[in-house]
Amino acid sequence: MRAKQMPSSSTRSKSQRLLLFSVLFLLALSFPFFFSSSSHSAASFSSTVYTHPHPRVQPETSFVASLENFLTHKAPSTSDDTVRSALQDDVTRFDDRKFAKEVEWVHRDPYYPLNFPIRPGSPLIEQHSIDYWLWADLIAPESERLLKNVVRVDRQEEADLFYVPFFTTISFFLLEKQQCKALYREALKWVTDQPAWKRSEGRDHIFSIHHPWSFKSVRRYVKNAIWLLPDMDSTGNWYKPGQVSLEKDLILPYVANVDLCDANCVSESESKRTTLVFFRGRLKRNAGGKIRSKLVAELADAKDVVIEEGTAGEQGKTAAQKGMRSSTFCLSPAGDTPSSARLFDAVVSGCIPVIISDELELPFEGILDYRKIAIFVSSTDAVQPGWLLTYLKGISSNKIREMRKNLVEFSRHFVYSSPAQPLGPEDLVWRMMGGKLVNIKLHTRRSQRVVKESRSVCSCDCRRGNMTGSHRSLPV
């Protein structure tokens, strides 16, 4: 897994990559960014998800190209922000300012935060580079940003949420083990020394922990924070009990390893899809990924089935892309964790994913209906002799055309880009974060003050949930 996730640019030496990371880390430590996003219910979103016009701006979807462009043209100058421990007086003053702002919001609008944008405070590689793409959106000049449901603010008390701009994954891949641990501790100390952290014990802070090995040595200290994850890992091999949950964390899609096959590409490739089932990747995995070796044994000699051992680099990408664009179904079995990047590679290739992972939680569930684009098969059924191929061959050509059409529509939800696009993965993250906001349990002292204040203005039957105080929730 580790070697396969390295950036695809073969021209960068290790020293150059380390220099690049050092520059980004200095930028990250300036920590001047807060953002906010409007919350939308799943119901209202689902009615617009397929009608939103595609923006005219041509996005950059190459991780390396986007990063180089950012460093050349958009990188802000770093500020002198000395790290220091927050005194209790600092926390108290911050708490007072923040509490006054929240009381003003609550009293002014009974439907807060439905009618207010969220404000978190601000960001690498390919497959797990979500921390770069999200940060690139937050830090871009407002005149260049297409997403208007996220607003950066300059004052901490104005922020609803704080996005921690630390690249947990790139540091894991580019640094030696002890260097990485030291850097993790330094970043942790900086964040936890701030009044905003001490006030809420981190419950309103967001960390990108999108690789199962990243930030591992210090996770126990940030378990209250919102984590951006590839999955919940129900195997228990990657996260300790109590660290992750659907209530506080968000699952984000992997960054696709292949190029987008748009509507024209899908239409042109339809007659070339002569392979029934395709899979290219590691054939032997640990933990939940053991299903792969069983599938190989079942499908290896079957007609119209291609099962290949994956390889890294441009050659591997080209082979995977060609195989997916010439196949009707693409297997998406569990990897070392329940999720696999091949699911998103298949979606953007117009190849119908066959998901074989019994414990998988998918990104943006509740907003996106994956039944329209994917086939779900239990691990038990998939390895029964002859069962899987018989099942797939029984799916009608009309159903296949319908699902392929849906793949064209859904693909934009999984393509990270700069500038970030409406209804792209960055946009969906901010929308779902809006829904998370009302469920965040802040520091006990602050919560008690809000409850006390809200009781004095409650003007109706609280048992029905109709109140103008601190009980604020979004429709499910």
Image (spheres, helix red, strand yellow):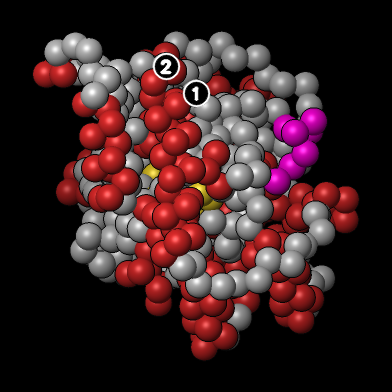
Magenta stretch: give its range: 139-145
- The residue singled out by tag 1 in the image is 116
Residue 58, percent from left and from top: 79, 31
Q: Which residue is depicted at the point 59% across and 14% down?
A: 52
- In this view, 238 is above or below 438: below
Q: Where's the C terminus, which quadrant?
A: top left
Please rate how many residues cluster around mark 1, counting C-alpha atoms within 10 Å: few if below 14, some from 14 to 19, many from 20.
Answer: some
Secondary structure found at label 2:
loop
The answer to whether 143 appears left or right of 315 in the picture is right
- In this view, 294 is above or below 141: below
Query: Could you say which is closer to the camera, residue 206 or residue 105?
Result: 105
Q: Which residue is depicted at the point 60% across and 50% down?
A: 122
The answer to whether 409 appears left or right of 115 in the picture is right
Indicate yes or no whether the magenta region holds residue 311: no
Indicate yes or no whether the magenta region holds residue 143: yes
Q: What residue type is labelled 2?
A: Asp
Q: Which residue is depicted at the point 58% across and 63% down?
A: 167
Please rate how many residues cluster around mark 2, counting C-alpha atoms within 10 Å: few if below 14, some from 14 to 19, many from 20.
Answer: some
Lower position in the chain sequence, tag 1 or tag 2: 2
- The residue singled out by tag 2 in the image is 109
